[in-house]
Image (tube, rainbow, N blue to C red):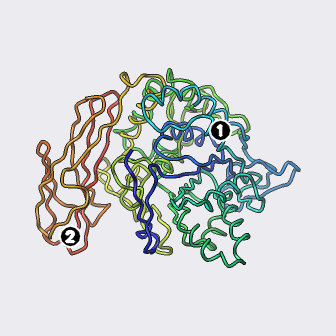
Amino acid sequence: MKKIVLVLALFLGFNQSFAYPKLPRTIVTTDGEIDDVDTFIRMLLYSNEYQLEGLIYSSSMWHYKGDGKGGLFTSEMPMTKAMYGKKTDLRWAGVTWIQELLAAYKKVYPNLSKNAKNYHSPDYLMSLVKVGNIDFEGEMQKITDGSEWIKKKLLDADPTPIYLQAWGGTNTIARALKSIEEQYSNTKEWDQIYAKVSRKAIIYTVMDQDATYKNYIGKHWPRVLTFYNSTQFAAFAYPWKKMIPLSMQSYFEGEYMSSKIILNHGALLAMYYSYGDGKKQAGDPEHIHGDLSKIKNSQWGNFNQYDFISEGDSPAFLQLVDIGLNNLDHPNYGGWGGRFVKSPDNAFRYEDGPHTAEFNPESNAVDNNYPQTRWLKAIQEDFAARADWCVKPFAAANHAPVVSVKEGADLYAKAGQKLLLHIDATDPDHNTVQLKAWSYPEAGSGKASIVLNGKTVTVEIPANAKKGETYHFIMEGNDNGSPSLTRYKRVIVTVI
């Protein structure tokens, strides 16, 4: 596994930099919606790509347990306030579903481990399960096992960053940060602790599903690097039929999902929710998606049995998977977790939206979601391959190629200069790999010419390019295995 290097100075303005261990560290917080369950299943199949250090139940504007005393709660978020009014609890799935998924993971773990290194043992993953702040949306007053676990990790001696994934609200993360502030703010250690935690915590949040970022984290911890996915996640969520290019939709439809992923792929995938599957999540009366009679002409479209429902939180962990795009350190580069640009209001907050819109060649228009949807075919084929890993030996399954560029990934050129690159790919299954090369103008300073001839690529920097501008080129390798797998190598040319 390649060593991933993160230069925090790029984000944080510090002169100090840290190197990742072999895998990036991450903690998942989740409110337990059905799309979180599906995201969790896919996340487990990719858990060899990062170091999981916490699996924590939390709440959100859509899901909370209640205080058990009949206390009424009104959402602080306008949408759910209007929808639900006062509630004692809301669509709460309980605090056992993660353990149930881990029990299924235990059954496929031996076979997964035959196909790739670094899968966590089931017992280790079970030790990471904690209950965080779940009573109400945005509740961060209680000190919980989950918040204390995050606090412990942020304060440990390892200086490498911890990606805090907020699949629901940020309240358990907020409580952890609040506990650190309460313990140290009036001590001589505070400046050192504050700087350490600000460097170490990186939040990837899918929307604002409570107000704790706005009310607490953003105000008290403004230097905590945050990736805020407010629009691009929708390509993975309930309205996917309205977001995904038509050419890619078959990879989310029932025929593909059932045969390639859900059915006959072991105990873990058998627990994956899909349209018309006859399943019903306990505790959530709004989970009607499994009923075939209720999925025609629904709010989000007309669906068939085994169609994809939603994995709105999957971009949060896909951001961590090293596929050759070098996007982990650089959210503005774009990758399987989406693409983000620096907020005009906070240099430590990266956002999506109109400022990250990209040209969609299928619709021939600028598209807010294309930074995510452009990768979806490759993402789904990769998911199908990992579903195979649950049941197939290495020799019968497919594994991703590796793309290389002889000249390296960071190059320099003058305006108008041509560069000759030599690209290649190797494949662990000895499959044939088709090479492609394309310019990614939105990730850099604009479009530049690129021509592929066999394994030789000629790139030409625009004659009017200015010193310091960057031009991004993606070298892509697609193998001819089944399913076909794709990996990349990003080359960035800086104008001198």
Considering depth in this image, is 369 or 48 the residue closer to the camera? Answer: 48
Q: Quadrant of residue 259?
A: top left
**Mark 2 Cα shell of 10 Å, populated few (<14), some (14-19), many (≥20):** many
Q: Which mark is residue 126?
A: 1
Q: Quadrant of residue 427?
A: top left
- In this view of the protein, which residue sits in the foreground, 440 or 193? 193
Across and down, in percent, residue 256 comes to 42, 28
Crowding near the residue tagged with mark 1, few <14, some 14–19, many ≥20 C-alpha atoms within 10 Å: some
User: What percent of the width, then of the height, locates residue 243?
Assistant: 43, 47
Q: The residue tagged with tag 1: helix, strand or loop?
A: helix
Q: What's the residue at 11%, 65% (across, down)?
A: 417
* Total tally of numbered discs in the picture: 2
Q: Residue 76 at x, y = what percent?
A: 71, 62
Percent of width and height locating residue 263? 51, 23
* Front tag of 1 and 2: 1
Classify residue 166 as left or right of residue 148. Answer: left
User: Residue 332 shows which numbered tag?
Assistant: none
Of 186 and 309, nearer the camera is 186
**Is 290 positioned to the left or the right of 81 in the image?**
left
For the residues labelled 1 and 2, the Cα–Cα distance comes to 50 Å
* Dot 1 amino acid type: Met
Which callout, 1 or 2, points at the residue further toward the start of the chain? 1
Quarter of the image for the N terminus: give it: top left
> Which residue is labeled 2 in the image?
495
